[in-house]
Amino acid sequence: MIDKKIAKIDFSEDIIKIKSKVYGLNPILGAYVMYNGKKIKFWKVEVLDYECAKEKFSKEKLENTDNGTILLTNDKEGLFVKARGGVLKITEVQGENSKRMNICDFLRGNKLVEGERFI
């Protein structure tokens, strides 16, 4: 039996486990995070391992940032979140009381702040 409690993303888990949760709960329930008291469901994600992530972000930023922290957010490149074992690139989301959409469209209408954490 699938319970809503298992749908919450825990960024202390390995990045591959998070990706598996996102794809495993799609389209039934959707894996989610909380941001400023609102639920955001992640429907599609990509994994950047540390080697790929170091090309985009500095090694210091990757090592000195807590898991679940927003590393980059803009409506051109998308949303990148630090996770254990690499960086998640979020490609499709659903805001609370809204429809599923591409991350770039979502970011045009929603303000996410770099350096803040998803809980």
Image: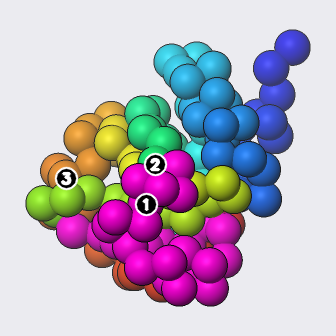
Q: Which residue corresponds to the image point at 62% horizontal and 78% vertical from the top-left?
A: 63
Place of residue 103 in the rendered image (x, y in percent of width and height, measured from the top left):
27, 49
Is residue 77 visible in the rendered image? The answer is yes
Q: State left or right for residue 44 relative to residue 63.
A: left
| 51, 40: nearer the viewer | 51
Q: Mark 1 to mark 2: distance in Å? A: 6 Å
Place of residue 69 in the rendered image (x, y in percent of width and height, measured from the top left):
56, 73
Quarter the N terminus occupies: top right
The residue segment tinted magenta is 49-74
Q: Mark 3 to mark 2: distance in Å? A: 18 Å
| 55 is within the stretch colored magenta | yes
| 70 is within the stretch colored magenta | yes
Residue marked by disc 2 = 48
**Secondary structure of residue under mark 3:** helix
Q: State left or right for residue 47 relative to residue 110.
A: right
Q: Which residue corresponds to the image point at 69% horizontal and 58% vertical from the top-left?
A: 84
Residue marked by disc 3 = 104
Residue 53 is marked as 1
Residue furthest right in the image? 1
**Secondary structure of residue under mark 2:** strand
Question: Residue 5, located in which quarter of the rendered image?
Answer: top right
Report crowding for label 1: few under 14, some 14 to 19, many 20 or more residues within 10 A (C-alpha). some
Report crowding for label 3: few under 14, some 14 to 19, many 20 or more residues within 10 A (C-alpha). many
Q: Which residue corresponds to the image point at 50% horizontal and 78% vertical from the top-left?
A: 59
Q: Amino acid at mark 2?
A: Leu
Which circle's residue, 3 or 2, is located before the other in the chain? 2
